Image: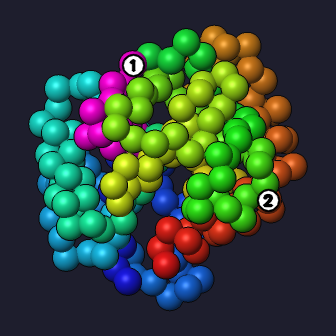
Amino acid sequence: MSVLIIQHADSEGPGLIADYLDSVGKQWKVVQIPEHPVPDATSHDALVILGGPQSVNDSDTYLKEERMMIRKALMLKKPVLGICLGAQQLALIANGKVHPSSVKEYGLGTVESTGESLFSSFPKRFPVVQWHEETFDLGDATLVVRGSAVKNQAFTFQSGVGLQFHLEVTEPMIREWVEINQKDLDAQNIDPRSIINEYLEHKDELKRLCFDFCQKFFS
């Protein structure tokens, strides 16, 4: 299997997803945009769209081109995984809307699975890393994970899966996010040390959950 990964920011790489793909010998390639043109995904078996500081409502041409790439992958029934910004791109394609969230979520949170097969090995409630200021309406998508503060946390649409939360975060990534988003955390009265400590407390479980999800998604 060959996996194409789209990255939008230096600090938001594939993390544990890349670790999983390496562990099972699957080939993967990262293309960072807008530094590089939006690639053709048709020569790959699966597509992953990572997060980033952009909004899908921005007028940048590359975001529109990215949605065209995702639509083409869905038409070919290729597995498409959207994370955070990537999930919001997928939500637009599913005729949903993306808008500012009433709650800005940073750090560890708990979400609840509806029992969809991709999460069948997960506990009913499980920890995830949250890092977003926008949320989405489902449109034609189906909700598969819900949250208490922000309801729509994961959905399926055709051959795509959208995750508002982050399963891919490694310890170096969360430390970098805390550092570069210090002002946003201060504005929410969030102690960055508490984010790091909570992550370290659940680090092994977070990796296991990510690998369990990837095993099903990339099978």
Q: Is residue 196 above or below residue 167?
A: above
Q: Is residue 102 above or below residue 215?
A: above
Q: Within 10 angstroms of label 2, few (less than 14), some, or many (20 or more) residues?
A: some
The amino acid at mark 2 is Glu
Residue designated by label 2: 205
Q: Is residue 66 above or below residue 185?
A: below
Residue designated by label 1: 99
Residue 193: quarter of image: top right
Residue 170 in the image: state x and y as whole percent. 65, 56
Which mark, residue 187? none
Numbered-mark total? 2
Does the magenta run of residues contain 88?
A: yes
Tag 1 and tag 2, C-beta contact below 8 Å: no
Does the magenta run of residues contain 27?
A: no
The amino acid at mark 1 is His
Q: Is residue 128 left or right of residue 27?
A: right
Give the magenta range: 85-99
Q: What residue is rendered at 18% in x and 70% in y?
A: 42
Q: Is residue 123 left or right of residue 12?
A: right
Disc 2 secondary structure class: helix
Front in this rendered view, residue 32 or 164: 164
Residue 83 in the image: state x and y as whole percent. 46, 47
Disc 1 secondary structure class: strand
Residue 109: quarter of image: top right
